[in-house]
Structure formats: structure tokens, C-alpha cells
């Protein structure tokens, strides 16, 4: 996950707030893919909707997991500083390009915006507003350090011609990849037009729902990149099969994803802590919406890619510290950026799943977030998240 110097995140130790570059819809309009050589003729899409089911009332308690009422009874931690140590600002302005008004008709929950219902049948859990995008830019830099500054793990050749980034989000990875391979045609797809307009000439962004039937040409892409789609995909097997169909014989696919379940190797993670509760709640929320949030722990990637037809599968895992608790300088820096990113918009990360899916009140969510930020800041808990990448190849002799 590379970050060029022109956009490299500012250190969380700085007194100045990190100021991500303006973001806006990409140069490609939602309808442009019909005229793109990348796409085959489009197929009809389902008109149905599958909204997230309403939470039970009152929300049932999970065994061994502290409920929202428990955190509300605790009250705000006395030493909580409301993240004054975080350097990430939330006042980033964005420019807008001409695009269908229905795509920009975002859903709003507690003042935060989410993708438009006109794009996809499902409800994605993460906000798409500037506060979340600012946090993601710093989080991206943490992953850049964690992966030893590597954009990919697959053994790509320098002459790669066509690549696609599924669920590109803010587009940072796609931009860096297009810079690294200036003669490669790169496409980034997402359900929200939140990508910047300042892009390399060989990169374009498209609004597209990867959970539907892919309309891209068969046997076309040299490289298919999938990253950080926790809680976004209901049927991974179907997505992998679409990817196999559109991958060129001899081409590569790479799926890089994580699990929010906090792990700990030295028994410093109390079972009643907010950090221990965090992953368990998200795991249960993912089960309720039918879209797993624990991909790195599920064992989904390897068998799914194999069943789709990919071969030469390789797996690699990393530990991402949640705060600068490690003694190792590199791991400490990773933890520092992770802490700065997560604590800057923790409510944005959890409010949809905790509030709408699990039935927590707004007050319970806010108090829980304060406790989790405090635990991360104190660094007494040596917790980390697990990331896993699996990459494989479409057989050279595939038809």
C-alpha cells in the first residue's frame, strides 16, 4: 500500500492537522461504462431491495459481551480528551463534478452520509463523508507501512496492461498503482463517487456494484485487486467467479482484507474491555446483515478462490497494532497511524452496525466509543487486528 510523498499522511505526532486532498467524483460518469472498451454489453440488474432488518427491541445481549446499557452505566471516562491528541481534521472541502443527482442523493444517519440507495440493493456500513475519508487516508498509510510499502503481493510483470480495483473507496491505492504502471489501463469501481479528480491519465473511476453480475469483458484483466471489503459482500463465491471470468488467462487476483476482532498475545486484553467487545459486536452484526466483517478469520478467501478456478494460491498475514504500544520502532509507527485514524472517527465506523443493526442507542454508542478511544490511548492493552492477503492466478490454458 504505497503513499507517494505528494500525498503522504502527516505524522500523528505533529501539532498540525493532517489535511487530505479534496475529493470528488471521478471523471467517469455512471453511464460511461456502456461506451468503455473495458465493458461488455450490460445485463439487467435486480430492482429489488434488501434493507438491513430492523434490530430486535430491546437488543438481545450476547454471551460474554458487555451490552450498550453496560457502557452507558459506566458514563464517560474521566480522562477522555475528546481526541484532542488526534491530528486529523474534519473540515476537508471537496469539489464536485457533473454527475447524476440520484447518485449524490446520500442516505443520512445521525448527521453522517452513506451511499445512495440508487446504486445498490445492500446497505454498506461505512459513511462516505469527508470525516471518514480523512480517517481512511491516514489508515491507508498505516497499511502502507505494515506491508513494507508494497502495493501488491502478486508477482506482476512490468508489462501489465489492464488492472481493476474493486471497491476502490477513496481511490488512493488505484492512484498509486496507476502511477507505478503508467502504461497500464487502471479502473477503480465503487458505489460512491468519492474519488478525486486529480488522477493519473491512465486511471478512471466508475460507479459500479461488484455484488451484481460484472459487465466487464471476459478474459480481460491482467490483475484484479480486492481490498478492505469487510461487511460489503454477501456471496464471496459469486464475486470470485465473476473475477475469474473477467481475468485474463495467466492473470492474477489478489484479495487483501482484515478482521476487526482484537487479538492479543500477552493477556493484556480484559474480556470486559471495550476493545474486546468491539470485534465481537461487529462479528455478530455482520452475521445479522449476512455480510461477514471477519474475513481474515473466516477462511473464506483460499477455498473461495480455489473453487472459482484460480491456482497458485499464496497467503500472507500481518498484525496491525492498534496503538503505539510495541517497542519495535516500525510496529510503533504503524500503531501510531492506526490510533490516529481510528480514534478520529470511531463513531463513524461503528454507528451503523452498533445502532441500526444491533439496536444500541445513540448515547450508548457515544459512551462506548469514548471508552475504546481511552483504552487505545492508554496503551495498556497490547491489541492488534489481523490482515490477510490471498493471491492466485487464472490458469494459462483456461478458455
Image (cartoon, rainbow, N blue to C red):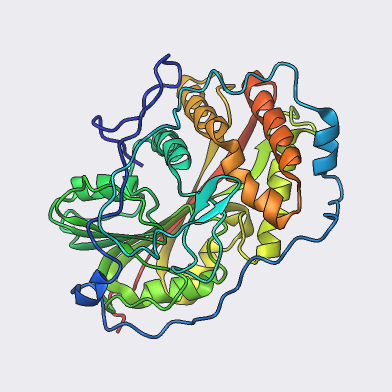
* One can see residue 282 in this view: no
Q: Quadrant of the C terminus?
A: bottom left
The percent position of residue 288, horizontal first and vertical second, equals: 71, 63
* One can see residue 194 in this view: yes
Q: Quadrant of residue 339?
A: top right
Q: Nearer the viewer, residue 329 or 126?
A: 126
Left or right of 90, for residue 223: left
| Count of numbered circles on the image | 0
Q: Quadrant of the N terminus?
A: top left
The percent position of residue 271, horizontal first and vertical second, equals: 81, 36
Q: Is residue 250 above or below residue 296?
A: below
Q: Residue at x 54, y 46 (%)?
A: 112
Q: Is residue 297 above or below residue 382?
A: below
Q: Quadrant of residue 314?
A: bottom left
Q: Residue at x 44, y 60 (%)?
A: 105
Left or right of 189, for residue 162: left
Q: Quadrant of residue 241?
A: bottom left
Q: Nearer the viewer, residue 318 or 88?
A: 88
Left or right of 123, for residue 364: right
The percent position of residue 107, horizontal first and vertical second, equals: 52, 57
Extreme residue in the top direction: 15
Q: Residue at x 58, y 23 (%)?
A: 83
Q: Nearer the viewer, residue 141 or 350?
A: 350
Amino acid at each position: 500500500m504505497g503513499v507517494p510523498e505528494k500525498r503522504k499522511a502527516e505524522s500523528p505526532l505533529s501539532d498540525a492537522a493532517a489535511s487530505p486532498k479534496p475529493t470528488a467524483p471521478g471523471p467517469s460518469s455512471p453511464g460511461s461504462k456502456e461506451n468503455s472498451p473495458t465493458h461488455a454489453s450490460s445485463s439487467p440488474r435486480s430492482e429489488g431491495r434488501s434493507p438491513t432488518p430492523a434490530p430486535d427491541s430491546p437488543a438481545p445481549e450476547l454471551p460474554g459481551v458487555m451490552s450498550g446499557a453496560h457502557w452507558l452505566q459506566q458514563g464517560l471516562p474521566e480522562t477522555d480528551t475528546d481526541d484532542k491528541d488526534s491530528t486529523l481534521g474534519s473540515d476537508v472541502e471537496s469539489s464536485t463534478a457533473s454527475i447524476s443527482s440520484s447518485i449524490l442523493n446520500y442516505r443520512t444517519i445521525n448527521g453522517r452520509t452513506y451511499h445512495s440507495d440508487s446504486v445498490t440493493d445492500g446497505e454498506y456500513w461505512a459513511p462516505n463523508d469527508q470525516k471518514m475519508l480523512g480517517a481512511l487516508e491516514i489508515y491507508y498509510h498505516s497499511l502502507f507501512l505494515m506491508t513494507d510499502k508494497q502495493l501488491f503481493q502478486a508477482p506482476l510483470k512490468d508489462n501489465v496492461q489492464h488492472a481493476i480495483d474493486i471497491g476502490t473507496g477513496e481511490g488512493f491505492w488505484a492512484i498509486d498503482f496507476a502511477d507505478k504502471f503508467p502504461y497500464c489501463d487502471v479502473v477503480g469501481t465503487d458505489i460512491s463517487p468519492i474519488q478525486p479528480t486529480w488522477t493519473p491519465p491512465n486511471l478512471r473511476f466508475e460507479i459500479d456494484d461488484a455484488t451484481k453480475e460484472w459487465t466487464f469483458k471476459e478474459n480481460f484483466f491482467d490483475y484484479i485487486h480486492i481490498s478492505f471489503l469487510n461487511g460489503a459482500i454477501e456471496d464471496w463465491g459469486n464475486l470470485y467467479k465473476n473475477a475469474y471470468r473477467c481475468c485474463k488467462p495467466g492473470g492474477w487476483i489478489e484479495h487483501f482484507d482484515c478482521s476487526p476482532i482484537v487479538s492479543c498475545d500477552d493477556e493484556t486484553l480484559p474480556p470486559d474491555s471495550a476493545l474486546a467487545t468491539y470485534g465481537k459486536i461487529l462479528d455478530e452484526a455482520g452475521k445479522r446483515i449476512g455480510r461477514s466483517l471477519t474475513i481474515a478469520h473466516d477462511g473464506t478467501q483460499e477455498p473461495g478462490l480455489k473453487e472459482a478456478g484460480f491456482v497458485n494460491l499464496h497467503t500472507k498475514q500481518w498484525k496491525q497494532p492498534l496503538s503505539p504500544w510495541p517497542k519495535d520502532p516500525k510496529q510503533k509507527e504503524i500503531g501510531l497511524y492506526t490510533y490516529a485514524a481510528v480514534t478520529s472517527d470511531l463513531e463513524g465506523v461503528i454507528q451503523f452496525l452498533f445502532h441500526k443493526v444491533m439496536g444500541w442507542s445513540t448515547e450508548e454508542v457515544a459512551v462506548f466509543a469514548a471508552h475504546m478511544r481511552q483504552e487505545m490511548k492508554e496503551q495498556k492493552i497490547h491489541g492488534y487486528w489481523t490482515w490477510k492477503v490471498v493471491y492466485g492466478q487464472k490458469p494459462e490454458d483456461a478458455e
